[in-house]
Image (cartoon, helix red, strand yellow):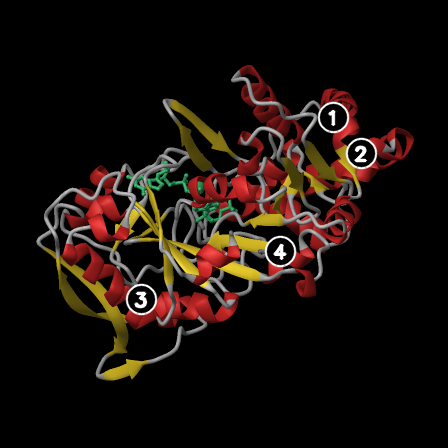
Amino acid sequence: MGNVIILGSQWGDEGKGKIVDLFSERFDIVARYQGGHNAGHTVFIGDKKFVLKLIPSGILRPGKKAVIGNGLVIDPAALLSEIEALESAGVEVTGNLSISNRAHVLFPSHRMLEKMSEARPGRVSIGTTSRGIGPCYEDKMGRRGVRVADLLDTAFFRSQYDSVMQEKVTLAKAFGIYEELDLGRIREEYEALAERIRPMVCDTALLLNRAIRGGKTVLFEGAQGTMLDVDHGTYPFVTSSSASAGGASTGTGVPPTRIQGVIGVSKAYITRVGGGPFPTEAVNGVGERIRQRGNEFGAVTGRPRRCGWFDVPLLRYTAEINGFDSLVVTKLDVLDEFDNIPVCVGYQCGKQEVAEMPPTVRQIEKLEPVYECVPGWNASTFGISSFDDLPIKAQEYLEFLEDRTGVEIGCISTGPERTQTIIRRGSRLEKLIA
Ligand code: GDP
Ligand code: IMO
Ligand code: MG
């Protein structure tokens, strides 16, 4: 038992929320390390549904502490409305949540500027969540961002605000994307929001490292997925943060030497929302069948998710980048009614075998998946909580994935609820969360 990272091994929406909620019972603190309210992590507890965006899913466990790390970009209005919604559903948030003083603050002007890359003629649209995430990270890396600590320093914030905003207005006007923003009213709103978050703000790196020294354990919750990571994903069709395991250290200030394990979450198939290459995308109605069975519509934007088959080379690539100790395979039940299940076991480009994930979208678009068809089980796996109770062909499907990816499958999810989960006895995963 130690400190463990849970993150997406595909293009996001793998079911991280459900798994983090489930495993957080065994940890003291759950910490998010990147992203913003572009994330949508769905958790079902009985008949109650929660969609967590900025707040770590661990908040749903009474008494557990939750941390929003320095690696996030925070829209304070979105954060407070998330807190209010949770508290009105009976979840205690303010006493259990700590927010990094070094996280960056997202403003309405970031949403406006997103149109510069997304809606301008001649630009390739990424199909973002339109939350302003990219422009906020641009300001961070451009060393002109406003951090939570700056927002709380009212005199400083007032003195900086006008020049920061004027720059955005000038840019937006130059690119013909300006929308009337009441800058004075926004400043006042942010000052009021600052007072409401102030009691939760602290140096979360110190808090986490002290807690670890005191024997407490931390579960790190990734948002998005490795193929959306700004460095390792299908650039430029990525998000603007480090969703992979390395991001957990930079995004919280907990050193790599204090992290004992990395668990990847993957669907039994694969989905992607937004633009970008997707070698195993299923077309001709099959994708639609997966979408309907899996209810594959975005938790944040409601957009239909593109659906396709499990991609072994992609998983091997993300396992390499993250060093997965174990894999959680979710939504096995969605494949219950297929006679045959194609699995991509390799890529070809023309007659040439392609062993490694190519770096460019141009190259990835040319990949032709090589499929092996695994027999389906045509029986319900919904809610099954023991590996031995799974139909033999479903067991064989999982063993096939395990064999081809070279990564242990330590946990299988067979439904959205906590109890609809299999943890394999004797697995590395079981030891990591013991
Ligand atoms: P996240 O962003 O990785 O947390 O994933 P999302 O919450 O965006 O999407 C996953 C969806 O699948 C959610 O609606 C979950 O409730 C649901 N889900 C998770 N695990 C399972 C499962 O094993 N079976 C089924 N049928 N649904 C699941
Ligand atoms: P969770 O944490 C799936 C995708 C967007 C778009 C790209 C860039 O729920 O898995 P952005 O708004 O981040 O600049 O959009 O990334 N994207 C996600 N796709 N799940 C997510 O989060 C995502 N967050 C962003 O659709 O393609
Ligand atoms: Mg999601």
Earlier sequence position, callout 1 versus callout 2: 2
Residues 293 and 59: in front is 59
The residue wearing badge 4 is: 248
For the residue carrying disc 3, how many other residues have a C-alpha within 10 Å: few (<14), some (14-19), or many (20+)? some
Residue nearer the viewer, 426 or 72:
426
Which element type, helix, strand or loop, lies under badge 1? helix
Give the secondary structure at mark 4. helix
The location of residue 48, given as percent across then percent down, is 41, 23
Q: Nearer the viewer, mark 3 or mark 2?
A: 3
The label shown at residue 174 is none
Which numbered disc covers residue 151? 2
* Other residues around mark 1 within 10 Å, as few (<14) / some (14–19) / many (≥20): some
**Mark-to-mark CA distance, 2 and 4:** 24 Å
Compute the Cα span from label 4 to label 3. Answer: 25 Å
How many marks are shown on the rendered structure?
A: 4
Q: Which mark is residue 402?
A: 3
* Of the image marks 4 and 3, the number of the one nearer the N terminus: 4
- The residue depicted at 80 percent of the width and 43 percent of the height is 203
Q: Is residue 187 left or right of residue 330?
A: right
Say whether marks 1 and 2 touch (CB < 8 Å): yes
Which residue is the extreme one toward the bottom? 352
Where is mark 1, residue-wise? 190
- Gap in Å between the C-alphas at discs 1 and 4? 28 Å
Amino acid at pointer 4: Ala
Counting residues from the N terminus, which is met first, the one under dot 3 or under dot 2?
Answer: 2
Ligand 1, image quadrant it occupies:
top left
Q: What residue is at 21 percent from the left and 48 percent from the top?
A: 389
Depth check, mark 1 against mark 4: the one in front is 4
- Residue under the point 15% across and 51% down: 391
Q: Is residue 65 left or right of residue 166?
A: left
Q: Is residue 345 left or right of residue 5?
A: left
